[in-house]
Image (cartoon, helix red, strand yellow):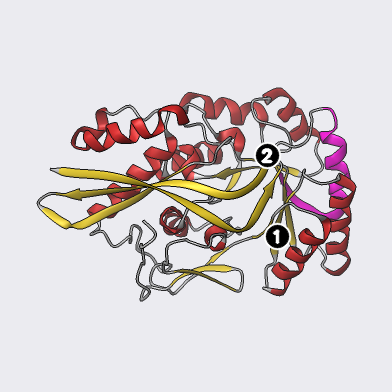
Amino acid sequence: MLKADYKKITLIFKRPGGTSRGVLTTKDSWILSVRDTNNPDIIGTGECSIIYGLSSDPMSTYEAKLNELSHRINEFPEVDLSEYPSIRFGLEIALSDLQSGGKKLLFPSSFTMGKKGIPINGLVWMGEFEFMRQQIIDKLEAGYDCVKLKIGAIDFNKELALLKMIRKDFGKTELELRVDANGAFSADDALEKLKQLSEYHIHSVEQPVRQHQWQEMAELCRLSPIDIALDEELIGLKDNEVTTMLETIKPGYIILKPSLLGGLRRSEFFIEQAEKQGVAWWVTSALESNIGLNAIAQWTATLNNPMPQGLGTGQLYTNNFTSPLYIDKAQLFYHPDTEWMTDIY
């Protein structure tokens, strides 16, 4: 017999995170714990992680659904979680952790043995020009050869000036530049902005216009001098819509955020469909605590994708869980001898 409970935590950003959708200072998650009453000392832990305004989960019934799941954990396949991708993600992790002994070691590999790191991109948040400039300098000094800039919040010409500053000292063979517009461009001006960005040898632009504009996005992908990567576009899609979306838009890349898509297995479904269409991909965390990030990182390590992944968000918070994850020279590593500290919940 299984027993489950959950607890809400509020993660606090070390410094506000600026996006085109607003400035983030805190981030809510629900930690889901599952145990077998025959062996109650072993606890499987998962994270139900949402981003307000981006996650498709209906927030008005969110805790009611978690409460239902907790009370019906022994019949969990019958609990309808189809509209709650973040809860599916948390449950998948918790059950996998319980099955593997409650040590948060879900996907043993050379990564979890501490022998191999995962290349990651450096993340530069939106803000005033000097703030973004300093972040860029810090990432370059830390050894990153792939940097992702969130754009769309300040004057576009200032953002171009930042890119020009970077390219003055670092050519395209030395530094890969990715930009994330988070849907900030309008369909009318997106192509012109993409053409201006292309002067700085940009690797890819994430979600230039808001999701659900398939025809407009398809036209951009056809005409853009820069590869377009989709992330928000994947959120909320039903299985039978995934292939249609890929065939219609024909993006250069898709970006997988498991807590927004419904878990690791469902993310694998997206990968399968993308590869059938010749669409490349990489994995990005979505502001989870180290509980969720740990599961995503261990899973990503088994996929053997050599591209820099977006897994550097574990250092964002003042009150994150102490975990074996750490970053060194632009790679995410796992130190197998480091014990978890979960005293924040």
Which residues lie in the magenta part? Answer: 188-205
- Kindly report the distance in space between the C-alpha atoms of the residues bearing marks 2 and 1: 20 Å
Image location (x, y in percent) of residue 273? 51, 36
Q: Please report contact status of discs 2 and 1: CB closer than 8 Å, yes or no.
A: no
Q: Is residue 312 left or right of residue 324?
A: right
Q: Say the numbered circle drawn on residue 5.
A: none
Residue 283 seen in render: no
Most foreground residue, 268 or 166: 166
273 shown above or below 146? above
Considering the numbered disc 2 on the image, is that residue within a helix, a strand or a loop? loop
136 shown above or below 78? below
> Which residue appears at 71% of the width and 36% of the height?
183
Q: Quadrant of residue 48?
A: top left
Q: Is residue 166 left or right of residue 268?
A: right
User: Disc 2 designates what residue?
Assistant: 21
Identity of the amino acid at label 1? Val
Q: Is residue 324 left or right of residue 97?
A: right
Image location (x, y in percent) of residue 103? 29, 62
Type of secondary structure dominating the magenta stretch:
helix
Identity of the amino acid at label 2? Arg
65 shown above or below 163? above
Residue 317 seen in render: yes
Q: Nearer the viewer, mark 2 or mark 1?
A: 2
User: Disc 1 designates what residue?
Assistant: 147
Location of the C terminus (image quadrant)? bottom left
Most foreground residue, 7 or 175: 7
Q: Pick whichever of labels 2 and 1 is earlier in the sequence.
A: 2
Most foreground residue, 40 or 221: 40
Image location (x, y in percent) of residue 125? 70, 54
